[in-house]
Image (tube, rainbow, N blue to C red):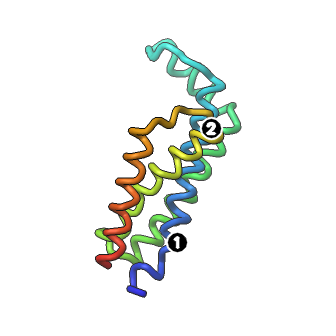
């Protein structure tokens, strides 16, 4: 196994934490609902976000994701590690489909497959 791929669990940890953060923040913003973005709404919406547990949980997970990412970058070439973050698109799309009931059409499935092939090729070049 190449030096970079031995850290695959760390890279996946960072990506999965980021995916979970995205999903929690989406759930929180869905509970808040659509709002007009203007100067009068900045403070009330910000306060509402601070009072929404899924958003706070998502921000918390972002912090841990950043920590895992910093550890990754201290150990792995960025030219290997960063392309693997695109797996977050795959994980987020799948979780969005199953948990958030979001649309998953053939074009998205094809795009996910292209991403997965790209990540495979990058890891094979390590």
Q: Which secondary structure lies at badge 1?
A: helix
Neighbour tally class for label 2: few under 14, some 14-19, many 20 plus, Cα within 10 Å: many
Image quarter (top left, top right, bottom left or bottom right) of the N terminus = bottom left
Quick check: 113 left or right of 101?
A: left
Determine whether 79 is above or below 31 in the image.
below
Q: Nearer the viewer, mark 1 or mark 2?
A: 1
- Residue at 47% from the left image edge and 72% from the top image edge: 71
Image quarter (top left, top right, bottom left or bottom right) of the C terminus = bottom left
Determine whether 118 is above or below 96 in the image.
below
- Residue at 52% from the left image edge and 62% from the top image edge: 14
Determine whether 109 is above or below 69 in the image.
above
Q: Position of residue 102 (x, y in %)?
A: 56, 33
Of the numbered discs in the image, which one, if any, rests on residue 21? none
Determine whether 17 is above or below 46 in the image.
below
Quick check: 80 left or right of 98?
A: left
Q: Disc 1 designates what residue? A: 10
Q: Position of residue 117 (x, y in %)?
A: 36, 61
> CB atoms at circles 1 and 2 under 8 Å apart?
no
Q: Disc 2 designates what residue? A: 55
Please tell me which residue lies in front, 91 or 111: 111
Q: Position of residue 7 (x, y in %)?
A: 48, 78
Of the numbered discs 1 and 2, the one sitting upstream in the chain is 1
Instruction: Write down the quadrant of residue 58 in the picture.
Output: top right
Q: Which secondary structure lies at badge 2?
A: helix
Neighbour tally class for label 1: few under 14, some 14-19, many 20 plus, Cα within 10 Å: some
Please tell me which residue lies in front, 67 or 31: 31
- Which residue is farthest front? 106
Give me the C-alpha separation between circle 1 and circle 2: 24 Å
């Amino acid at each position: 196994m190449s030096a970079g791929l031995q850290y695959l669990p760390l890279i996946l940890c960072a990506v999965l934490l980021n995916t979970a953060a995205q999903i929690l923040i989406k759930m929180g913003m869905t509970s808040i609902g659509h709002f007009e973005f203007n100067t009068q709404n900045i403070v009330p919406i910000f306060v509402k976000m601070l009072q929404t547990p899924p958003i706070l949980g998502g921000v918390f997970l972002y912090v841990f994701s950043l920590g895992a990412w910093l550890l990754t970058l201290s150990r792995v070439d960025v030219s290997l590690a960063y392309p693997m973050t695109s797996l977050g698109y795959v994980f987020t799309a799948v979780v969005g489909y199953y948990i958030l009931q979001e649309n998953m059409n053939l074009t998205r499935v094809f795009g996910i497959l292209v991403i997965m092939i790209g990540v495979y090729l990058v890891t094979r070049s390590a």
